[in-house]
Amino acid sequence: MRAGTAGASRTCLVPWERSQRSRGESRERWRRGGRRIHTLLLPSLKQGAEAAEGARVFTIINYCKTTIWPGITPGNSFNGGGFPLKPGESVVFTAPVGWSGRIWGRTGCDFDRDGNGSCQTGACGSVLKCSASGQTPATLAEFTLAPLDFYDVSLVDGFNLPITVTPVNGQGGNCSSAGCDGDLRDNCPSELAVKFDGKTVACRSACDVFNTDQYCCRGVFGNSVICQPTYYSKIFKQACPGAYSYAYDDPTSIFTCVGGDYIVSFCSKSRKQRVCTYHINKLICSGSPGRGASSTGKWLAVLLLGLASMWWSSWL
């Protein structure tokens, strides 16, 4: 899915997962909006079976060393499309089948109490809650939710933060992790670099900088046969092997999954980093299921502590 085509219609006659909604007064408290659990670089985990029938659970995690401000469009299912996320913090939302949109990170933002302000990268105008796409350059996670989901990470509009998308609990498709294994800002060519106070905060695309048919895959280059990887797109691909590095980078960049939930991680170490979420009363982690009971036990202990803390605070 190339940047700008997140709304492309794709259908597949595959039944999707039907999740059951749990009941109970205390769990109802936890179900209101995107509830955060503040843990040290661990994801907040979904409480109860929050997902409505056919919905997908999105866990968004900030592994970066500074606060970021995720932007999401359309944002009706995601706290209006924008919110702050501190280092080590995470938040959980659900999106219905049929949702088609993008998630990106904004950096260096300053918003007032009314949600008005500015960002160094990824700004969607001058507001906290996005109703329009972010300003380039920005790394994008794109989704089309259907019986067969399509998802990708795109650098076609440039790069500002490493993003990985990790499906969990998928029932079909390849359900592979998409995105980055490194931070492109560390090796951004000087002619593409966006700097703030002498520090590279983003990396523009070659199309954005040079605006040629070759780099933008248009005109005579407007097809996958003629438009081939360039010097710059290869640098992008090295940092993010599982992401679109240019417009026709489809074979290694677009992924599918049936009935999975998604963990969107900012600044994770690599696509292989183990991440977890909570789905239908079960702790679900990426990677091999048999990867050591002790590790899962640690995740469960953190979960129980978080649940106890949230339950106690809800009654104060």
Image: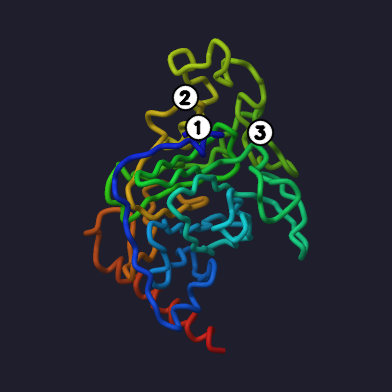
Find the distance from the CA under tag 3 to the CA under tag 1. Answer: 22 Å
Mark 3 or 2, which is nearer the eye?
Answer: 2
Task: Using a 10 Å C-alpha cutoff, classify the residue at mark 1 as few (fewer than 14 neighbours), some (14 to 19) or many (20 or more).
Answer: many
Q: Which amino acid type corresponds to the residue marked 2 in the rendered image?
A: Tyr
In the rendered image, residue 282, in percent from the top left (x then y), is placed at 31, 68
Q: Mark 2 points at which residue?
A: 248
Q: Could you say which quadrant of the image residue 190 lies in?
A: top right
**SS at circle 1:** loop
Q: Earlier in the sequence, mark 3 or mark 2?
A: 3
Q: List the single residue furthest toward the left.
A: 290
In the rendered image, residue 34, in percent from the top left (x then y), is placed at 53, 66
Q: Nearer the viewer, residue 58 or 195?
A: 58
Q: Which mark is residue 2?
A: 1
Q: Which of marks 1 and 2 is nearer the N terminus?
A: 1
**SS at circle 2:** loop
Q: Residue at x 21, y 59 (%)?
A: 290
Quadrant holding the C terminus: bottom right
In the visual, does 230 lie left or right of 174?
right
In the rendered image, residue 145, in percent from the top left (x then y), is placed at 43, 47
Q: Which mark is residue 193?
A: 3
